[in-house]
Image: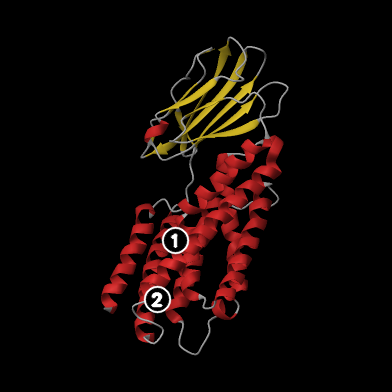
Amino acid sequence: MSRSIVFALLLVLTGLFAPSLSRAHELQPGYAALEQIDQSNWKVFWRTPDVSGKPMAIDLLLPSICQPQSGPATVPKSGAWETGWIATCGGSLLGQKLIISGLEATKTDVLVRFAPLDQSAVSLRLTAYQPSLILPREPGQWEVFSTYAGLGFEHILEGWDHLLFLFALLILIKGFWRLVGAVTAFTVAHSLTLVASTMNWITLPAAPVEAVIALSIVFLASEIVLTKPGTKRLSQSAPWLVTFAFGLLHGLGFAGALREIGLPQSDIPLALFAFNVGVEAGQLAFVLAAGFLFWLLSLPFGRQSVLGYRAITVALAYAIGGWSSYWLIERIVSFS
C-alpha cells in the first residue's frame, strides 16, 4: 500500500510541475501600446512572445479606420519579438474595435496600453476567450485593477518554482497556525521587495535572483529529508524567519515579471496593489488545493503509521529537490 501511495503522489506532483521544467518562472504576455501623437496619427508598438525561436502566431490589428492596420514584421529583441509603426486613423479610436488575431488559439494574454490625447492612459487585457475589445471612451481605474489582479493571479499559478516552494512548506511545517505564520511572513517579504524593485529602489540582476529562488527550494527539500523525530530543524523552529528571508528573493522574481509586462505610468500604485492582490489570491488558492490533496492522499496511512507517512514526505522531498536542483543548474549555466 505504501509504495502505491508514494507512486500516486509522485505522479500528481509530476503532472503539476514537469511540463514546465525549463520554463519555471516565465510570464510572457503579448504587449501593445497605442499612443496618440496628434488628431490623426498614433505611435504603435507591438511585442509578441517567443515560441521556440519564432514569434508566437498572433498579430495586432488596429481598427479598420487606421492605415496600416498591422505593422512590419517583428524582429527578435530581449527574448521576444517587437515591431513598431505610425498609423494614420480617419477618426477617433474611442469606441473602435481592436483585435489580436490568432490569440484564441493560444493560452497567453495580451496587454494593451491605450493613451489618447488629453486623457489618462489605461491598461487593458485581451485573452484567448476575449481576443478583441472596444477601446473605452472613458478609461477608468477599474480596468487597471482587474487587468493587473488577473495577471498576478496567473503569474503565481504559472510560476512553478514559487508553487514548489509553497508545497515544500506544506510538507515541512506541522501545525496550522505555524504554517499560517510562515506563509504570512513570506507574503509580507515578497510584497516589500516587489514594490521596492518595481519602483527601482533596489536593483539586482535577474539571473542570480532566479538561481537563488531555486536554491531556496533545494534548501526546503533538504530540511524535509534531514528532519528526525523529536528534533526540529531551523525551518521548523523558526519558520517565519526562513520564509521571510526567502520571500524577499521571491519578491524580486515577481518584480522581474512585472517589469516585463510594464506598468501604466499614471496608475503605478494601483497596478502594484492589484498585481499583489492577484498573487496572494493565487497563492491562497494553491495552498488550499495542495493542502487538501496532500491530506487526502495521506489518509490511508493515518497518523499511527509514522513510517508510512515519513516515506511519503521523503519521496516528495527527493522529487522537489531533484526538480529544483535542475532549475538551479540551468539558471547558473545561463549566467554566461
Neighbourhood count class around disc 1 (C-alpha, 10 Å): few under 14, some 14–19, many 20 upward:
many
Residue at image coords 44%, 61%: 328
Look at the picture and state if 280 lies above or below 271: below
Q: Residue furthest bottom?
A: 230
Quarter location, residue 49: top left
Neighbourhood count class around disc 2 (C-alpha, 10 Å): few under 14, some 14–19, many 20 upward:
many
Secondary-structure class at tag 1: helix
Q: Residue furthest top?
A: 90
| Residue 215 x, y percent position in the rendering | 49, 65
Secondary-structure class at tag 2: helix
Look at the picture and state if 215 lies above or below 142: below
Q: Earlier in the sequence, mark 2 or mark 1?
A: 2
The reply to whether residue 33 is visible in this rendering is yes
Horizontal arrangement in the rendering, residue 138 relative to residue 290 (left or right): right
Q: 141 or 123: nearer the eye?
A: 141
Q: Residue furthest right?
A: 118
**Location of mark 1 (residue):** 328
| Residue 192 x, y percent position in the rendering | 67, 57
Residue at image coords 50%, 31%: 47
Q: Amino acid at mark 1?
A: Leu
Horizontal arrangement in the rendering, residue 279 relative to residue 308 (left or right): right
| Residue 284 x, y percent position in the rendering | 54, 60
Q: Amino acid at mark 2?
A: Thr
Look at the picture and state if 85 lies above or below 52: above
**Location of mark 2 (residue):** 313
Q: 172 or 8: nearer the eye?
A: 8
Q: Quadrant of the image for the N terminus?
A: bottom left
The reply to whether residue 257 is visible in this rendering is no
